[in-house]
Amino acid sequence: MAELNYGLSELAVEIRGMVREFAVSRVKPVRAELDETGRFPAEILRELGKMDLMGLYIPAEYGGTFEGDSMPNIIAVEELSRICIGVSVSYAANGLGADPILIGGSEEQKKKYLPPLASGEKWAAYALTEPNAGSDAGSIRTTAVKKGDTYVLNGTKQWITNGGEADIYTVFAVTDKSRGARGVSAFIVEKGTPGFSFGKKENKLGIRASATRELIFEDCEVPAANLIGREGTGFIWAMKTFDVSRPGIAAQSVGLAQGALDEAVAYAKVREQFGKPIIANQGLSWMLADMATQVEAARALTYAVVKTIDSGAKDYSKFSAMCKVFASDVAMRVTTDAVQVFGGYGYMKEYPVEKMMRDAKILQIYEGTNQIQRDIIGMALNKEYAAAARR
Amino acid sequence: MGLKIDLDLCTGCGACVAVCPFCALAQRADGKVEVNEACTACGACLDSCPVGALSLETESKPLAMGALDGYRGLWVFAEQRGGKIHEVSFELLGVGRVLADRLGVELCAVLLGHQAGDCAGPLFEHGADKVYQVDHPALENYTAEPYAEALSALIRKYKPEVVLAGATSLGRGFIPRVAVQVNAGLTADCTELDVEADSRLLIQTRPAFGGNIMACIVCPDHRPQMATVRPKVFKPAEPVAGRTGTRVVENLPLKEPGVKVLETVNAMQNEVNVAGAEFIVTGGRGLGAPENFKLMAELADALGGAAVGASRAAVDAGWISSFHQVGQTGKTVRPKIYIACGVSGQIQHLVGMNSSDTIIAINKDPDAPIFGVADVGIVGDLFQVVPELIKALRG
Amino acid sequence: MHIVVCAKQVPNTTQVRINPETNTLVREGVESIMNPFDENALEMALQLKERHPGTQVTVLTMGPPQAVDILKEAVGRGADEVMLLCDKAFAGSDTWATSYALSMAIGKLPKPDLVLFGKQAIDGDTAQVGPGVADWLGMPCITCACKIEIAGNRALVERAFEDGYEKLEVALPCALTVLKEANVPRMASLRGKMAAKKLQVAPTTAEMVGADPAKLGLSASPTRVMKIFSPPPKTGGVLWQGEEPAVMAQRLVDLLRERKLI
């Protein structure tokens, strides 16, 4: 198929081929079952680990293959998402969980925790959200109180992706209530730590293969050595993580939308009504054309943001938010249109597009709702234009 | 010997490249064609060349004929397990009788085993003129090495010109060793056999390329001419009660087997085996889910105890064990009635069932290749048609 | 332990179609792949390597220069060594001559404990090369193996028959032909693929393995392909459509009863 020249590295192209083949041969045959039962795709993640694909974002010194180019990781997420974002979110959540360690962790923490993540031997999760702290992440209530050379954690985290399945959790907790968001600290908590347990597994509209659970901390003692950075820096790590992880959600969106487009075009070519394939109807082919154009535009923006981040740019929150909001809105529209192309069959579980449409919705919600993304963009515009006016 | 390309004549049209079944022809940078190691000198390309640039070079082999004359007789390896002769052996005696008569030679059977009871009787009744029998403790359970050793010893001693064995997992497991030991040509999994009376050559036809093409194979300069023959493609010989023949008991010093049989497990205990079944109901990808094989079982029951078969797609999806698989990589079947439900009919499936007496296909897609071999094709949703069929059968 | 896996590059026969007009094989666009059953043999070797550290896996293929592709694939999955047996002298070899050539090549390798083959190759479907090689090597050979455990210098092997399994014990070295049911072949790893890219494979010739030229190639092959043809399509059936399922079902049962088939 013809494709735009995104100047991908040889490694990125290699990864694309590998993950595409993997997704088709390993994920596609089970995605309907995973969706139906909500079973966690553990065997899929294990195999990705064996294929050296769990450490694409981790530098070589910690056992991964990252050498300054984030595109291989982004493309791996995109290609998995083309088949199933329930699987791709379980995959990408490892990176989300590891990012605070990569960004703010000490050398000792990196050496201890990153290599088993890179090999896929262990899995990670990121624990920020609480029942009363979603978009308003600064209002978290989980507390961490210093006691000797430990911190004692108390509280509940909600909707944690890979909850219960992951071995390593980066958990955000308040160490100084009086300082608001500046009183939040980040901790590495290992599964099996006394006082750390899991609540119910959520029954979701989409991404049903992913494990979404509550984390419960009851006088859970975590070694002080597991504090990431200094006390009070947690919110910085949380937000910086989002800045680099949002293009991952965009990549999921691009992949999912591409997958829905693949299905829609293939179906439109074989489905015959009034004696001809439905793709021969201009109304329908224009719909497909719009879908394809949106997917490519979302991909172009996403890749450009990733390359900008890789180039060492300092101020990219706005762009990160832009690609997330744009691509996820595209995914929602394209998957909805794909169901429309399939007509009545699209509404049935025999075909994959209804699942894709259900899955798409989460992309507009998690890692900051699309309203929050627009806030970020809006605030950045306000700031940038004010600065320009002063000059 | 091999394929010769007259480069002066070759126009570089590429017509031969497309027809070569072995990808052995390729166009060079200048467009002319060259042949590579994959060539088997089958000659499939010869007619494709519009300018006659292709020819087969053959060596004359004057030495052979005298040496080959010492080989006479047509042998059938009689497969027995637990004292029971495998049906394929009777099928081989059936076709073997015809071929042996054409060659004007004896039809013989070879029986290997240990205290397996009198298996020679049924072989005589099914047409064997002579039975070579080896009874030895090393042959008690089938393992390839002593079986090969015994059959090779008999071949060296008695020099048959043709040796046929069933293309069962047993036959295909040890016959290749025999071919190496007696320096003979061996053709696997034949579906047709014939002899040229004057040259005494066995013409062996077998499917290749997953059944997409058929190849006729001969073995001009080596004896015996050996073939394994696919079960269920020939009709078994009609037994003649009381018919008898010559029994040759051979004592052979066989080596201790290197492979020891610890345990035999029958995995089909409570199910009808598709191999040998008179009625087969096969489910394919169209079943959509493993639990829908229950519908196949119900239809099998309504037919009064049919076997349940499966296409490769259904087996690969993990819906049913591979013991049920029909086709190129599964079993070849020849039931009276074969009902294919939701089976598209890939060529690999068709070669395993297209000699069934009556084939019925149920499929949603009117263009499914399965309808090409079906005696009765029903275009429809199997989930609607099959329950009605069950009702009609029971009614 | 040293395990040799013999693999073959084959056209993907599932992609081969017959042109209905000319009744000839349409081979264009058919990719070359590692014989799928050989993938199971390789996977069995790699799993044994994981269970028995220190195991070396060598993959051997005989074929044209482009067969190196399957050796690269094997290295990508974790094979340690490869050998490409490639020589015009092998051209046209049937299973007898092929098994001789492979056995000579194996004789040049460090002495193997196990020699693994796929059950059969999907282009020829003969299933003869594995047992043939074993015979040249004087090894026992268990065909249709689906499970293996190594204990000391013995192997416990499960092999399938048409209607069940047999559990066997054999002393090493031995040869096995491996079924699809044995495992799910892994995909190549990223690091494996990178190593495979750098791999240079010099062809090993007939002379290098000390093979007797009189036992090689077409002239040494006892069998000859006399002709090749496309199977005649079966015709003459009837197709019912567009009627109520109950009507068609009843008509079918009536027909079968009328023909005294049921």
Image: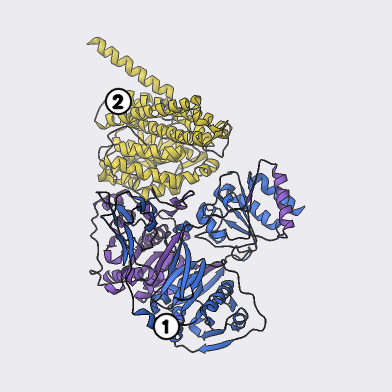
Image hue for chain C: purple
Chain with colour blue in the figure: B
Residue at x-position 40% and y-position 62%: C41
Q: Does residue B255 appear in the picture of this structure?
A: no
Which label is found at residue A316? 2
Which label is found at residue B69? 1
Image coordinates of residue C2 in percent, x first then y, are 32, 67
Residue at x-position 24% and y-position 49%: B30
| Residue at disc 2, secondary structure | loop
Relative to the observer, which residue lies in front, B115 or C232?
C232
Q: Does residue B196 appear in the picture of this structure?
A: yes
Image coordinates of residue A215 in percent, x first then y, are 46, 38
Image hue for chain A: yellow
Colouring convention used in this rendered image of the protein: by chain
Observer-side mark, 2 or 1, equals 1
Image coordinates of residue C123 in percent, x first then y, are 42, 59
Q: Residues within 10 Å of mark 2 (few under 14, many from 20)?
A: some
Residue at x-position 33% and y-position 73%: B60
Output the chain of dot 1: B
Residue extending farthest right: B395
